Structures are given as C-alpha cells and as structure tokens.
Image (cartoon, helix red, strand yellow):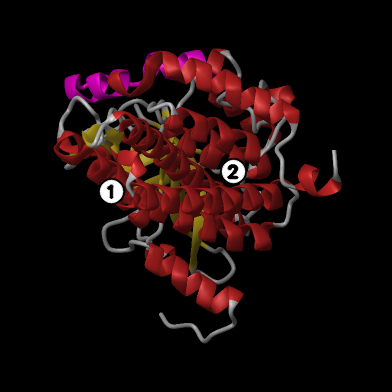
C-alpha cells in the first residue's frame, strides 16, 4: 500500500470496529429510537449492549476497562451509530468529555472509581457547564464551590444539561476562590445525582429524542474533598481540565453530525433511485435532484476529514492544533447535517415530512449541530482570531 493511501485511510482495526458497531446499531435503528422518544423511553438497552461489547470505552485505557484506543476510535463508533439511525448523544458526554477529563486530570483513585463504569456503560456521567446568563462565555459561570471543613458546598444553576435523568453522577463546572488571590477560578466536581440539595427540571424541547434536557439546581450541595477532580493538591488545573474535555466534545459533535448526514443522504439516494414519475426514469436521473445530493456527498467527506484530523491531533497530544481543527470539524459537521437533512426531505417531497420516513424530526435535530455545544459564530470568531491572527472581536 502506498504511503499516500495509508495516510488517508483508517487502520484495519478501526474499519473492523466500524463494521461491528454498524451491525449492532442496525439492530436498533431509527424506528427503535423514534419509538423510545414517543413513549418516553430511553436508549438503555442499546447503551448497555454497546458497553458490553467494549464500544463505549474504546478511548479509555485498558487498565480501567477500556479498549486502549483514542478519540478517533470513539468518534468512529458514534458516527456509525448515527449513520444507522441510532445515535447515542450521551457518548459525547460520558466517555468523551467526562471520561477524557478524568483519565487525563483525575487522581489514581478517581480513575479507578469512575472510569470502569464509564467504559462499560454501567455508570453514566452527565456534564454540567452551561448557564443561562453565561452561554458560551465560561468566564461568566456563577456556580460556586466553597470550602467547608474537609469538603465543599456547591451552589448555583445549570441549564440545557443532557441526560441527567439517566445519569448516576454529573461532572459540574464550578468556580472556587483562589486562596492566594481571592479571585474565582474554574474547578470541576463529580456530584452524585442523588445528592441532597440537588434537583432538576426538564426543559420541553421541540424535537423528539430519548435524551432529555434539564435545568439543574444546586442548593448547598455538600461534596467530599475527593469529589474535586485532580484533588486539592492540584489547585491550578481547572481551566486545563475544562479544555481537556471540550476538544473531545467538539470532535464527537462533528462525528455525530456526519453520521446523521450519512443517514439522511443514504435515505435520499435510495428514494431517488427508486421513485419514478416522468418517462419511467427514477427522479435521481434528473440533475435537479442529483446535484444537491452530490454536493452533500462532497461536503460530508470534507467534514469527515476534519474530525478525523482533529481526533488524530488530540490523540497525538497536540492540544493547541486539536482545538483549532476540533472547532472547524464541529462547524463543518453542523453545516452538512443541516444541508443533508434539508436535501433529503426535499428529495422525498411530501413524504419527507411524514413519520413513516423519519426525516422531519431530523430537520430540527440537525439544527442543534449549528448551536451546541458552541455556536458556529463563536467558532468563526475562534478561527478568525487563532487561525488567521485577526483582532479579537468579542
């Protein structure tokens, strides 16, 4: 195999991983997800089966029950799930964000306590960062953790936090006073969801999904000292810990969106190849149908290359370059998911908005990739400033 082909091809192990995941995810598929969403069910059966097969923890170290792979492997797993019509949103959160932060920043005891359960799916950890008055500006977070004896007291609110009703714990981003300067600095805490003083309120959303969104309330929640990620002996780690999880979040977001785009494109291509209206030709023979689909295919392959490069940089330990490409990958994925679902609906005509074909709800779901976990405008700000060297605009 030539050097050029090798550089742009995934290793055999990852190709085999994709095939195995696609086979499992296809057992569930879009109809299963839609049924769970309509009836208030969860993805628990699929989640646990994915965990038993080692797919949820492929990015975590083998000594903690993981597969010993990297973020590129985990993102490939999520993309295949989404392409099969059965995306697992909590993969972005539990093994990618929380797993990566604890693996890179936690103490030995914290890794032993939480990573095995995250890897096999028996411990689902949510991630709490967003606040109503902070948005993308994490410097404005007002949730605070105050020292109290040999523990901490957590007070504040979070919003748009996914899957808290399914989780056993939440990795909470708070701020605590620096003993030297008195200024507030970031700190991350693992809080059990049955903690006294913690409550949640569901947020009604306009698209159907098994994973729900919540506003969280911390009313003097007491946490032990060991809840602080990295321990008290690592006082300046909070900001670095945060970015250790945000790059994986963006990479996974890009892969999620690419998988969704693949699903929509496959549905549209199949329909365009079968549906005949004029002169016994399938509608896919007409450029008005074929060209938008071809354009989406090109955009999709561009977006996939971006998340693969971002993941490779992250796995190589180049956090600065990974941050640049992770943001671009998330942007590109969000764009192609929106474009693919729109073209797929249009290809199907009226059928595209029926429940039977399962595309209408995806129009709204795909739009999320342009908004969360960071808006495309903030990504453009990042690229303008860090990639192009332009003055900061915000």
Where in the figure is residue 151, as x and y percent of width and height? 49, 41
Q: Quadrant of the C terminus?
A: bottom left
The numbered dot on residue 101 is 2
Comparing 121 with 168, the one in front is: 121
Residue shown at the point (54%, 78%) measured from the top left: 385
Where in the figure is residue 224, as x and y percent of width and height? 50, 36
Residue highlighted by disc 1 = 342
Front label number (1 vs 2): 1
Q: Residue furthest bottom?
A: 391
- Locate residue 379 relative to residue 301 in the image: left or right: left
Residue 149 appears anywhere in the view: no
Crowd class of label 2 (few under 14; some 14 to 19; many from 20; radius 10 Å):
many
Q: Is residue 34 magenta?
A: yes
Answer with the quarter of the image where residue 108 lies. Answer: top right
Secondary structure, magenta segment, majority class? helix
Comparing 173 with 211, the one in front is: 211
Residue 70 appears anywhere in the view: yes
- Locate residue 26 relative to residue 42 in the image: left or right: right
Q: Is residue 213 magenta?
A: no
Which structural element holds mark 2?
Answer: helix
Instruction: Give the residues in magenta.
Output: 32-50
Rendered position, 221 above or below 294: above
Which structural element holds mark 1?
Answer: helix
Q: Quadrant of the N terminus?
A: top right
Rendered position, 302 above or below 171: below
């Amino acid at each position: 195999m030539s050097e050029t082909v090798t550089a742009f091809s995934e290793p055999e192990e990852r190709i085999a991983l994709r095939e195995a995941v696609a086979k499992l995810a296809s057992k569930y598929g879009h109809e299963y997800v839609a049924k769970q969403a309509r009836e208030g069910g969860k993805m628990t059966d699929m989640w646990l089966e994915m965990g038993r097969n080692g797919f949820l923890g492929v990015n975590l170290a083998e000594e903690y029950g993981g597969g010993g792979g990297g973020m590129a492997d985990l993102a490939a797993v999520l993309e295949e799930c989404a392409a099969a019509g059965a995306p697992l949103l909590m993969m972005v959160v539990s093994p990618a964000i929380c797993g990566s932060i604890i693996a890179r920043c936690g103490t030995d005891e914290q890794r032993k306590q939480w990573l095995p359960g995250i890897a096999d799916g028996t411990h689902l950890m949510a991630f709490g960062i967003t606040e109503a008055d902070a948005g993308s500006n994490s410097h404005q977070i007002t949730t605070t953790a105050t020292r109290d004896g040999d523990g901490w007291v957590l007070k504040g609110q979070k919003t748009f936090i996914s899957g808290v009703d399914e989780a056993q714990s939440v990795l909470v981003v708070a701020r605590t006073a620096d003993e030297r300067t008195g200024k507030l600095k970031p700190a991350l805490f693992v809080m059990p969801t049955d903690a006294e003083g913690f409550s949640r309120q569901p947020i009604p959303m306009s698209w159907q999904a098994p994973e729900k969104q919540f506003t969280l309330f911390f009313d003097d929640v007491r946490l032990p000292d060991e809840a602080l990620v990295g321990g008290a002996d690592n006082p300046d780690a909070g900001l670095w810990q945060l970015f250790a999880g945000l790059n994986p979040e963006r990479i996974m977001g890009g892969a999620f969106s690419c998988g969704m785009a693949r699903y929509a494109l496959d549905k549209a291509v199949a329909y365009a190849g079968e549906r005949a209206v004029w002169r016994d030709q399938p509608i896919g023979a007409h450029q008005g149908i074929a060209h938008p689909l071809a354009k989406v295919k090109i955009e999709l392959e561009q977006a996939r290359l971006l998340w693969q490069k971002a993941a490779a940089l992250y796995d190589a330990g180049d956090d600065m370059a990974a941050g640049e490409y992770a943001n671009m990958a998330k942007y590109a994925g969000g764009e192609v998911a929106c474009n693919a679902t729109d073209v797929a609906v249009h290809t199907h005509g009226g059928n595209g908005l029926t429940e039977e074909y399962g595309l209408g709800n995806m129009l709204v779901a795909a739009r999320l990739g342009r908004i969360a976990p960071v808006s495309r405008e903030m990504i453009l700000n990042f690229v303008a400033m860090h990639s192009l060297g332009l003055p900061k605009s915000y």
